[in-house]
Amino acid sequence: MSELPKGIEQEQQLIAKAYERWQISTEKFDYFVTGGTGALCAFVAQTGHFTRLGWNPSTLEAIALLILIASVVAGFMTIERMNDGMYYNHLQLHHETRARYLRFELDTHPDQQQFPDGVTGRPIDRAELEKRAADSAASARKLALREGPTWAAIMRSQNWRNWLLGAGFFTLIVARLWAPYLPSSQ
């Protein structure tokens, strides 16, 4: 089979490089935020002065800890969904590339009836190659439909993580700043 045209190869290399950089930076940020939030939970759990529940800083600190734990859970969900999204994206790109390559082969050799199979090397006829190109394009379209809700779920879990982290941090600050202003009998 023929090689891809230079423009397509360069385009795919640039796309792959940009995607890889984005993926790595996003993963690192999610790991950092989730790990930092987990460390904050451990710190609050170790240094918290938890007493009887009531309208007091101790209760507010316990609430902050629960909110921060929920943020960690949302962070793990973000990471898990991101992994799923990248897997679906990889499959979609694979099928799109395969379909484009097969269409390119068919279009550049309009009179050729037999093509070597890319895996086994055995000859396959033009109809089978057209079927494979159509199947790959259909698979890419199906994955594109699945990819949208996956990325929406990632954004939702990131938003939940961020809002819970902000709320937990704010609640913790209020609890820690409130304690010195209470009478010493509490």
Image (spheres, rainbow, N blue to C red):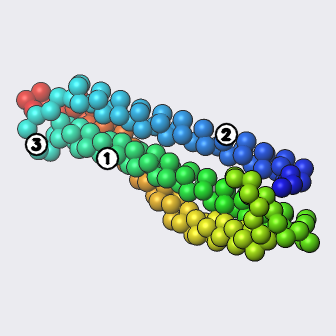
Label number found at residue 70: 1
* Residue marked by disc 3: 53
Side of 6 relative to 70 (left or right): right
Residue 101 position within the rendered picture, expressed as x and y whole percent measured from the top left = 79, 60
SS under mark 3: loop
Crowding near pointer 1: few (<14 within 10 Å), some, many (20+)?
some
Residue at image coords 75%, 74%: 127
Residue at image coords 78%, 50%: 12
SS under mark 1: helix
Amino acid type, mark 3: Leu
Q: Are marks 1 and 3 in contact (CB under 8 Å)?
A: no
Amino acid type, mark 1: Ala
Of 32 and 181, nearer the camera is 32
Crowding near pointer 3: few (<14 within 10 Å), some, many (20+)?
few
SS under mark 2: helix
Looking at the rendered image, the disc whose residue lies closer to the viewer, 3 or 2, is: 2
Q: Are marks 1 and 2 in contact (CB under 8 Å)?
A: no
> Nearer the N terminus, badge 3 or badge 2?
2
Instruction: For the N terminus, give its image quadrant.
Output: bottom right
Residue 20, located in which quarter of the rendered image?
top right
- For the question of whether residue 64 can be seen, the reply is no
Residue 5 position within the rendered picture, expressed as x and y whole percent measured from the top left = 89, 54
Of 11 and 42, nearer the camera is 11
Q: Are marks 3 and 2 in contact (CB under 8 Å)?
A: no
Side of 132 relative to 69 (left or right): right
* Residue marked by disc 2: 21
Amino acid type, mark 2: Arg
Measure the C-alpha gap from mark 1 to mark 3. 20 Å
Looking at the rendered image, the disc whose residue lies closer to the viewer, 1 or 3, is: 1
> Nearer the N terminus, badge 1 or badge 3?
3
